[in-house]
Image (spheres, rainbow, N blue to C red):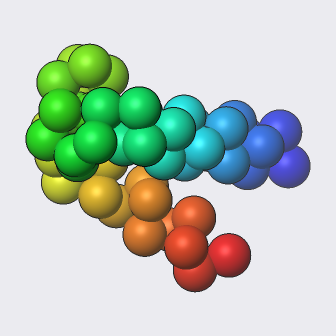
């Protein structure tokens, strides 16, 4: 169950980055990841 909570925090972190930076691509750059990774995390969060 602990890994689920870590994933939830990562998803929230990605969502906050999108809000702060105004786009998925800018958020991805700030998180040192790719845009599709950010999109996937936000999509999973939206499904919950």
Q: Residue at x 50, y 68 (%)?
A: 44
Q: Residue at x 36, y 42 (%)?
A: 18
- Compared across the picture, whether 15 is left or right of 34 comes to right
Q: Is residue 8 above or below residue 28?
A: below
- Compared across the picture, whether 48 is left or right of 33 comes to right
Q: Position of residue 30 (x, y in %)?
A: 26, 19
Query: Which picture quadrant has residue 14?
Result: top left
Q: Residue at x 44, y 59 (%)?
A: 42
| Residue 37 visible to the viewer | no
Residue nearest the viewer, comparing 46 with 19: 19
How many numbered discs?
0
Query: Which picture quadrant has residue 26?
Result: top left
Q: Position of residue 20 (x, y in %)?
A: 41, 32
For this orientation, the residue located farthest to the right is 1
- Compared across the picture, whether 37 is left or right of 47 comes to left
Residue nearest the viewer, comparing 44 with 29: 29
Q: Position of residue 46 (x, y in %)?
A: 55, 73
Q: Quadrant of the C terminus?
A: bottom right
Q: Position of residue 6 (x, y in %)?
A: 69, 36
Q: Is residue 1 above or below residue 48?
A: above
| Residue 38 visible to the viewer | yes
Residue nearest the viewer, comparing 18 with 44: 18
Q: Residue at x 18, y 54 (%)?
A: 36
Residue nearest the viewer, comparing 19 with 43: 19
């Amino acid at each position: 169950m602990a890994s689920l909570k870590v994933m939830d925090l990562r998803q929230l972190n990605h969502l906050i980055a999108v809000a702060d930076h105004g786009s998925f691509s800018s958020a991805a750059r700030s998180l040192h990841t790719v845009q599709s990774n950010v999109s996937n995390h936000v999509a999973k969060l939206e499904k919950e």
